[in-house]
């Protein structure tokens, strides 16, 4: 019973309706696309009209089915005479569809199709059938009852089905199949015909045969209409048409597309990147040919032996010299003869198209013959080539790549691959030119420059993202605190003010933030004009925007406190920039972790040091070698900041105390040729040891011997070095930082310093502003910043505020370095705390004397660092396994350090 019920569902008009709607929609979309595409054709070929007739006929058959089903199921009152009219018109279009199909497939395989006598006879018969069905539709229009219908109508319907399925279409199919087996049919067209036969024509014939024949072969009443066959064949034919159209139109069917279409190869970038790396290391043309073959094999799946690179070598008079390889002479002779004979015709096309693909040209030539395509096809057949890729350099043909015929059977080269061929050929032209002119160093230098630029841009993008994220986080918790100032007293106006300002503004007047708050409020109270400033909250280490306006009615001052946004950050500092286009680095300084490290090293925000910090951050985000010019005491801290921002793991320092006259430094840097002994083999070069993980800091670079300076310059410029006393090249990406207190330009003029190394370093040199010549207000800003850093608690900061006299002592006897200023500030604070008998109560920051970010992080953990194994291992290595130094640094007992070291297996 279940099977019978299921069979009844399938053998119903509802099932046919569900199957026919998608078929009709698909054909309608297809028809509309063809009409739109026809507007782009300069000349519409006759086979295009035939295709429209085929689609229209098939679509009208589906429309007739839908009309019949809708009238029976949904609109029983609908005039059935109209339904009969549409059905009889569908029989007319059914005949036209098959006649057009027969002519269409025959047209495809003929360059100039002339209507044969056979087809003229069939056109006459098809016309007679069409006239018969039209006459029946007109004169039998009012007959609704089946009994009153023209009694020969079923006979003509059966006869027309037999006619179109056998005498009309089968001979055309047979002739087309015979034609594509012969010569002169393009491979693309053969592929199209094969897809058309398998994907459309055969399914169409089978579907129509199954739909029509059961009317006569099954007399059973249950299957009188055979809706099962109609529904399933419609579904199968719809799927066949969809997949056939997807495949065949990608192969330039009817020249709707100019090239074979295919999805982009997502691995091309990786393959091209690998090829670039190999091309950068080639030393001769034999290696170059091997790289080309490997690239074509891995990217386009062409066998290595099927691809050849040929070079045209010019002598002094410009004549072409043949290459010495015997196997290449015949090909080169054919190519050169072709180029010489047809130069005026071919050269403009070759420069415009940039590649000859045999299948594409053959297919175009088949439907649109011309003298140019004839010559090109003759040339490609003569050299037996699927692809001829010319290689140009500065408008001159210097070589070409030839891919042999049938190198990829059954697969055609699509438009994406064509573009990839051209891109590779363009780059190959530069390589060949460099090889021919012995200028490989320019290519390697360019690659090193691009790598450095790419790294710089990547770091800048990361900084930009981090900066934007910081503002997004602030916007989510944005709140504005309100305070009222009157009679030298502040009153909190809301809870947000207490949360943003963690200090007691009425009692802790020595704190820099509180001082700024009082200063702004008193200024507004005195001059009745708005004031604003950005101050730093020591508790949260974030900036706050303080704005104050007078309240003229109540005679007080309204102060607002909020977190800064982008405009606030820029407004207060952008006027101090030498180059206003560097405002993005100004944001990075204020919002990113790298910028905070730089600000901790230099807490001042005056114009001199602000521009220096931006330059420091910009160089630190790159990967280029840096020359530091500053006081010796500040070198280490700046180098550590650059090292940390560069995300390196190991910082290795070489300190040169005097001129080096031996090669110990060179051997340490570049390694030694193994033939010089066991020690040379076992000793690893620093550039190899620090590769991808380290930073090399060379102090007093001017003491390095000239030969080592030249080798170092080559490494910085090209990214590879040569092992000392060897020709072996090694690649490394160690970050180089150098320092010198000498005038290197003057030393280079005197021949005491390498000009090559100077040229590499002077582009990325960093010079710190002199504290001796620093404006007084900037020096005071630095002093205040170091005071905040030195004290880890705000409780007694108001007692330790330096007086104007104490600050003037720093101005009169100026420090020579930032480290010197930090120490003198700390000494003044210690002296002041002892004088006020609060030295024991003042907790000084343990990270004050260091600029190493990792040490700063450990210092902030304090005794909690003992519980972190990773931090303890770092301190153990940093302080050379000295437990006393670790305990002093963390402010804990030595026994606690000893116990933790045993626990972590450090002892």
Image: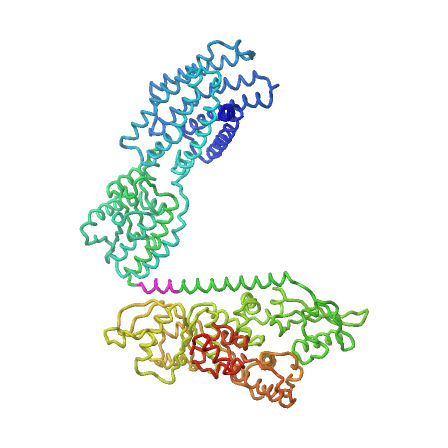
Work out whether residue 675 can be spotted: yes
Residue at the outermost front position: 1
Of 875 and 57, nearer the camera is 875
Q: Position of residue 61 (x, y in %)?
A: 48, 23
Q: Is residue 135 magenta?
A: no
Residue at the outermost left position: 326
Q: Tell me the quarter of the picture where residue 285 sits.
A: bottom left
Q: How is the structure coloured here?
A: rainbow
Q: Tell me the quarter of the picture where residue 382 sits.
A: top left
Q: In the displayed structure, would residue 466 be above or below residue 796?
A: above
The segment highlighted magenta reads: 439-448
Q: Is residue 444 magenta?
A: yes
Q: Position of residue 155 (x, y in %)?
A: 44, 12
Q: In the displayed structure, would residue 156 be above or below residue 271?
A: above
Residue at the (52%, 71%) spot, across then down? 614
The C terminus: image quadrant:
bottom left
Q: In the displayed structure, would residue 802 be above or below residue 85?
A: below
- Image side of residue 529 versus residue 365, left or right: right
Residue at the outermost bottom position: 835
Q: Main secondary structure of the magenta part?
A: helix
- Image side of residue 339 versus residue 501, left or right: left
- Image side of residue 899 versus residue 692, left or right: right
Q: Position of residue 31 (x, y in %)?
A: 48, 30
Of 179 and 24, nearer the camera is 24
Residue at the (68%, 64%) spot, across then down? 479
Q: Tell me the quarter of the picture where residue 813 sits.
A: bottom right
Q: Position of residue 535 (x, y in %)?
A: 64, 73
Residue at the (53%, 63%) spot, across then down? 464
Q: In the displayed structure, would residue 726 be above or below residue 292?
A: below
């Amino acid at each position: 019973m279940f099977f019978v019920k299921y069979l009844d569902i399938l053998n119903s008009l509802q099932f046919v309706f569900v199957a026919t709607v998608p078929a009709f929609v698909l054909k309608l979309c297809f028809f509309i696309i063809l009409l739109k595409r026809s507007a782009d054709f300069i000349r519409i070929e006759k086979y295009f009209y035939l295709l429209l007739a085929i689609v229209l006929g098939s679509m009208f058959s589906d429309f007739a089915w839908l009309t019949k089903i809708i009238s029976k199921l949904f609109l029983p009152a609908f005039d059935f005479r109209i339904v009969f009219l549409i059905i009889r018109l569908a029989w007319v279009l059914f005949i036209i569809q098959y006649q057009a199909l027969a002519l269409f497939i025959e047209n495809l395989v003929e360059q100039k199709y002339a209507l044969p006598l056979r087809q003229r006879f069939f056109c006459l018969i098809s016309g007679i059938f069409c006239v018969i069905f039209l006459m029946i539709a007109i004169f039998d229009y009012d007959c609704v009852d089946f009994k009153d219908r023209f009694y020969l109508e079923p006979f003509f319907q059966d006869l027309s089905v037999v006619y179109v399925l056998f005498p009309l279409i089968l001979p055309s199919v047979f002739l087309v199949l015979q034609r594509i087996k012969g010569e002169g049919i393009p491979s693309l067209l053969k592929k199209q015909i094969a897809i058309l036969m398998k994907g459309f024509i055969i399914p169409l014939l089978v579907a129509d045969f199954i739909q029509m024949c059961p009317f006569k072969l099954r007399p059973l009443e249950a299957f009188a209409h055979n809706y099962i066959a109609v529904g399933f064949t419609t579904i199968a034919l719809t799927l066949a048409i969809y997949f056939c159209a997807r495949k065949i139109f990608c192969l330039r069917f009817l020249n709707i597309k100019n090239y074979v279409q295919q999805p982009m190869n997502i691995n091309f970038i990786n393959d091209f990147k690998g090829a670039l790396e190999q091309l950068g290391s080639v030393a001769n043309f034999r290696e170059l040919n091997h790289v080309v073959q490997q690239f074509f094999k891995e990217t386009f799946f062409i066998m290595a032996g099927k691809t050849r690179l040929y070079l045209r070598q010019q002598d002094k008079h410009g004549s072409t010299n043949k290459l010495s390889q015997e196997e290449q002479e015949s090909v080169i002779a054919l190519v050169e003869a072709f180029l010489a004979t047809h130069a005026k015709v071919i050269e403009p096309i070759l420069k415009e198209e940039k590649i000859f693909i045999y299948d594409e040209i053959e297919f175009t030539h088949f439907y649109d013959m011309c003298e140019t395509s004839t010559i090109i096809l003759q040339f490609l057949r003569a050299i037996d080539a699927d692809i001829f890729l010319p290689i140009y350099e500065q408008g001159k043909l210097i070589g070409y790549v030839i891919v042999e015929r049938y190198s990829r059977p059954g697969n055609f080269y699509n438009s994406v691959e064509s573009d990839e061929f051209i891109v590779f050929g363009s780059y190959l032209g530069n390589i060949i030119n460099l090889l021919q002119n012995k200028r490989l160093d320019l290519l390697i230098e360019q690659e090193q420059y691009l790598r450095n630029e790419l790294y710089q841009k990547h770091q800048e993008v990361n900084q930009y993202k981090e900066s934007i994220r910081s503002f997004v986080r602030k916007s989510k918790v944005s709140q504005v605190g309100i305070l009222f100032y009157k009679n030298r007293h502040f009153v909190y106006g809301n809870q947000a003010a207490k949360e943003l300002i963690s200090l007691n503004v009425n009692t802790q007047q020595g704190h820099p933030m509180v001082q700024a708050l009082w200063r702004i409020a008193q200024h507004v109270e005195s001059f009745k004009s708005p004031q604003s400033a950005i101050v730093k909250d020591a508790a949260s280490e974030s900036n706050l925007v303080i704005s104050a306006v007078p309240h003229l009615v109540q005679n007080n001052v309204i102060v607002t406190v909020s977190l800064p946004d982008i405009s606030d950050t820029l407004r207060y500092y952008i006027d101090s920039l030498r180059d206003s286009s560097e405002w993005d680095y100004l944001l990075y300084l204020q919002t990113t972790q790298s910028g905070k490290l730089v600000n901790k090293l230099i807490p001042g925000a005056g114009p001199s040091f602000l521009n220096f910090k931006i330059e420091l951050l910009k160089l630190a985000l790159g990967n280029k070698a840096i020359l530091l010019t500053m006081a010796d005491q500040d070198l280490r801290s700046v180098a550590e900041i650059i090292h940390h921002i560069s995300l390196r793991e190991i910082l290795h320092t070489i300190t040169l105390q005097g001129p080096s006259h031996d090669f110990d430094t060179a051997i340490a840097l570049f390694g030694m040729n193994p033939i010089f002994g066991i020690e040379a083999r076992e000793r690893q070069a620093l550039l190899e040891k620090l590769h991808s993980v380290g930073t090399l800091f060379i102090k007093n670079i001017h003491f390095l011997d000239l030969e080592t300076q030249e080798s170092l310059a080559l490494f910085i410029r090209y990214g590879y070095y040569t092992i000392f006393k060897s020709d072996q090249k090694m690649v490394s990406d160690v970050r180089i930082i150098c320092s010198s207190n000498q005038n290197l330009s003057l030393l280079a003029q005197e021949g005491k310093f390498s000009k090559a190394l100077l040229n590499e370093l002077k582009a990325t040199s960093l010079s710190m502003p002199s504290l001796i010549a620093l404006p007084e207000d900037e020096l005071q800003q630095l002093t205040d910043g170091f005071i905040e850093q030195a004290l880890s608690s705000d409780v007694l900061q108001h007692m330790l505020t330096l007086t104007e006299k104490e600050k003037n002592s720093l101005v009169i006897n100026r420090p020579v370095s930032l480290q010197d200023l930090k120490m003198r500030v700390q000494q003044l604070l210690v002296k002041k705390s002892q004088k006020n008998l609060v030295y024991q109560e003042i907790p000084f920051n343990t990270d004050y004397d260091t600029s190493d970010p990792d040490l700063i992080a450990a210092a902030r953990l304090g005794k909690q660092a003992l519980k972190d194994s990773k931090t303890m291992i770092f301190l153990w290595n940093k302080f050379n396994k000295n437990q006393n130094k670790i305990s002093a640094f963390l402010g804990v007992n030595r026994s606690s350090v000893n116990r933790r070291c045993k626990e972590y297996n450090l002892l």
